[in-house]
Image (cartoon, rainbow, N blue to C red):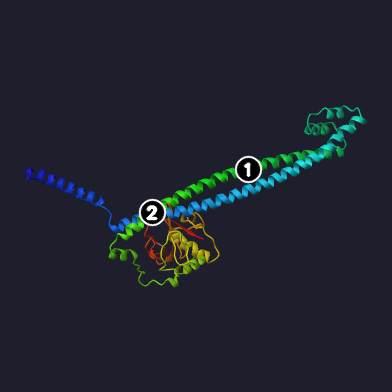
Amino acid sequence: MRGSRPVRGTAAVVLSTALIAGLGSAANAAPTPLGQLRKLAREAERTSEQIHQANDTLKRAKRDQVSAEKAIVKANKAAAIAERKRARMQGPLNNIASINLRNTQNVGVMSVLMAESPQEILDQSRSEAALTQTTLNILVDYENAMNAASQAKKSAVDNRAKAIEAQAKARKAQADLDKARIAMRKRIASVQGEFASLPPNLRNEWKSVKLPEGFDPKIAFGANILGNKALQIAMTRIGSPYVWGATGPNAFDCSGLVYWAYRQLGIVLPRASQGMAVGGLAVPEKDIQPGDLVIYYSDASHVGLYAGNGQVLHAPTFGQTVRLSPLYHAPVNTIRRY
């Protein structure tokens, strides 16, 4: 009996090694045709949402640039007006010194005449009471005019810096957009090529739609009244094809479906799922209601509308149509309510 124990131990080691090897082989096995298509389609969708995000960023940067350039024009006009006012007051200021020179030998007046700047005159006049109230008023107005001109010039400089920054952001956003579009063309070609290589039975399986048994989309109600209206509108698009970049009314990508549904209610959401993921109100999963936006994946690259009963309405991916899927068909990133 004692001699047999090492044999059993050896057998166990051999069996364990075989199992581990088998698991390793399974893990390294080539993906199935549908699995490969799913992977390529997921990459394409991610790139598509990056395009939407880059486009949104570009639009914001251009708006900021236009706003900053308008502010420059406004600030320059204000600076010119302030400078003209200051220049007009230079004459009365010069007269102050001339009049006092002729009419008095007061030491205070002489100190005014010897001053190197209007500010020094003002300081001396206040401390020595050497000038009349009218004179003081003129000096105060002159000081205010100088400050206004200085502030207007500073505002022009600041807005010019903002415009330069906005231009740089716009150039970067445009470069990101161009880069994403190039990548997208390659992604589309890969997905279409993979789909074309599938046998008919797998193509049909990829396209097939199965509504949950007993599910009636018309009776999905909840506390999110606005979202529920958007959901009911989106429900009318069930069966519409998925098309990258499409926003309806007859074809959609994932964010395009949500964007279109809310647009029918006069509400403009961000175009990209990443933008949708940071707007609205965050909702805990336990409080989810029909019409809430469900954003998926760590990079927020997919979105759908919660339809109740553990289902989400979404435009899934290439080759498929707008449909209902289980809420947790993919990892949930966040839930938002608009």
Q: Is tag 2's residue or tag 1's residue first in the polypeptide sequence? A: 1
Q: Is residue 290 left or right of residue 191?
A: right
* Viewer-side residue, 44 vs 14: 44
Disc 2, SS = helix
* Viewer-side residue, 62 vs 197: 197
Vertical arrangement, residue 59 with respect to residue 76, above or below: below
Which residue is rendered at x = 16% and y = 48% of the image?
Answer: 15
The circle on residue 147 is none
Q: Is residue 190 left or right of residue 106?
A: left
Any part of residue 274 in sight? no
Amino acid type of the residue tagged 1 in the rendering:
Arg
User: Residue tagged by mark 1?
Assistant: 160
* Viewer-side residue, 210 vs 205: 205
Query: Which quadrant of the figure contains the N terminus?
Result: top left
Vertical arrangement, residue 12 with respect to residue 327, above or below: above
Disc 1, SS = helix
| Separation (CA) of disc 2 from disc 1 | 40 Å
Q: Position of residue 194 (x, y in %)?
A: 32, 57
User: Residue tagged by mark 2?
Assistant: 187
Amino acid type of the residue tagged 2 in the rendering:
Arg
Q: Nearer the viewer, mark 2 or mark 1?
A: 2
Which residue is rendered at x = 47% and y = 50% of the image?
Answer: 178
Q: Is residue 10 left or right of residue 256?
A: left
Vertical arrangement, residue 68 with respect to residue 90, above or below: below
Q: Position of residue 158 (x, y in %)?
A: 63, 42
